Image (cartoon, rainbow, N blue to C red):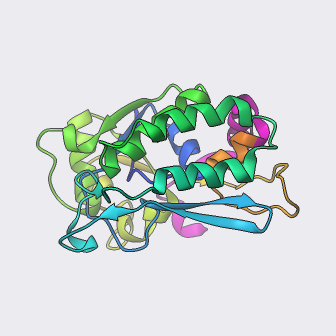
């Protein structure tokens, strides 16, 4: 069983869904601290004037650094949901799949007023995965029993809980996994580590020159769910074993 672990971000990019699609089980790491100015609360779309950043309004009375993703609440009374929907509509109303996808997003956003950040992001990622017919199993880390440690030791704990010896990591985690030894604590505990290998593809967008690494909805509005998933799978390259990662 191939397991991947990622924090639930807001409107993730194509590579996030490649990681989901490449995994048998995908774990949302939702019980970790929310960092300042991160992708848990913001992402980019594309409009007539270029890229546009959408940022969720969250309430952090004790300071952002003290909040966890799964316990962070949205700012009460802030109209960010309607603002985001208005921006999305303005950017993509002429896109080929607007009439198919936008009602799904609108219904989800407008029904989410009682959700916390983690629950909202996880639900949105699941909605978009289902829209693309990605069939991986989803698990939420905060619902697992006995998970301990930080960084790669926490990943070890999750893998042991799920009884897997095959971990697929986003390439961005290489720095802390490989910091002290090849494969880190995962390899030391008998878990084979592979790193995602994804080359961001180009595709037809509205409004001029291509902009890379936007939220996945940019591709979905322009290409639709079937072609977006095909594009993701074409951009997917064989994962890199930790023994070979230093050669890159």
Between 93 and 248, which is closer to the camera in this rendering?
Answer: 93
Q: Is residue 91 above or below residue 247?
A: above
Quadrant where the image shows the C terminus: bottom right
Q: Is residue 120 magenta?
A: no
Residue 228 place in picture, x, y as percent = 71, 38
Name the quadrant containing residue 53. Answer: bottom right
Q: Which quarter of the figure is the N terminus placed in?
A: top left
Residue plotted at (85% across, 49% down):
204
Answer whether residue 196 is visible to the viewer in this image. Answer: no
Residue drawn at 13 percent across, 39 percent down: 145
Segment colored magenta? 222-248
Q: Position of residue 138 (x, y in %)?
A: 38, 33
Q: Whole-percent x and y of residue 70?
A: 26, 50
Which residue extends farthest front?
Answer: 77
Q: Quadrant of residue 103?
A: top right
- Is residue 209 rendered to the left or right of residue 11? right
Res 106 quadrant in image: top right
Q: Which of these two is toward me, 136 or 63?
A: 63
Which residue occupies 22% across, 62% down? 150
Is 241 in the magenta? yes
Q: Position of residue 137 (x, y in %)?
A: 41, 28
């Amino acid at each position: 069983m191939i397991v991947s672990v990622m924090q639930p971000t807001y409107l993730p990019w194509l590579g996030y869904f490649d990681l989901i699609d490449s995994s048998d089980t995908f774990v949302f790491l939702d019980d970790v601290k929310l960092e300042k100015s991160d992708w848990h609360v913001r992402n980019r779309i594309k409009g007539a004037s270029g890229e546009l950043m959408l940022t969720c309004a969250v309430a952090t009375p004790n300071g952002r650094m003290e909040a966890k993703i799964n316990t962070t609440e949205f700012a009460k009374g802030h109209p960010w949901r309607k603002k985001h929907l208005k921006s999305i509509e303005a950017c993509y109303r002429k896109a080929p799949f607007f009439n198919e996808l936008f009602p799904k997003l609108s219904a989800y956003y407008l029904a989410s007023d009682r959700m916390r950040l983690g629950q909202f992001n996880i639900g949105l990622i699941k909605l978009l995965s289902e829209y693309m017919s990605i069939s991986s199993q989803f698990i939420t880390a905060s619902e697992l029993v006995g998970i301990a440690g930080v960084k790669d030791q926490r990943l070890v704990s999750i893998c042991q809980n799920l009884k897997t010896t095959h971990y697929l990591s986003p390439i961005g985690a290489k720095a802390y996994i490989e910091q002290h030894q090849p494969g880190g604590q995962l390899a030391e505990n008998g878990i084979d580590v592979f790193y995602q290998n994804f080359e961001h593809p180009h595709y037809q967008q509205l409004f001029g020159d291509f902009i890379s690494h936007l939220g996945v909805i940019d591709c979905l509005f322009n290409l639709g769910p079937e072609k977006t998933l095909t594009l993701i799978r074409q951009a997917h390259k064989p994962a890199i074993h930790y023994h070979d990662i230093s050669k890159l």
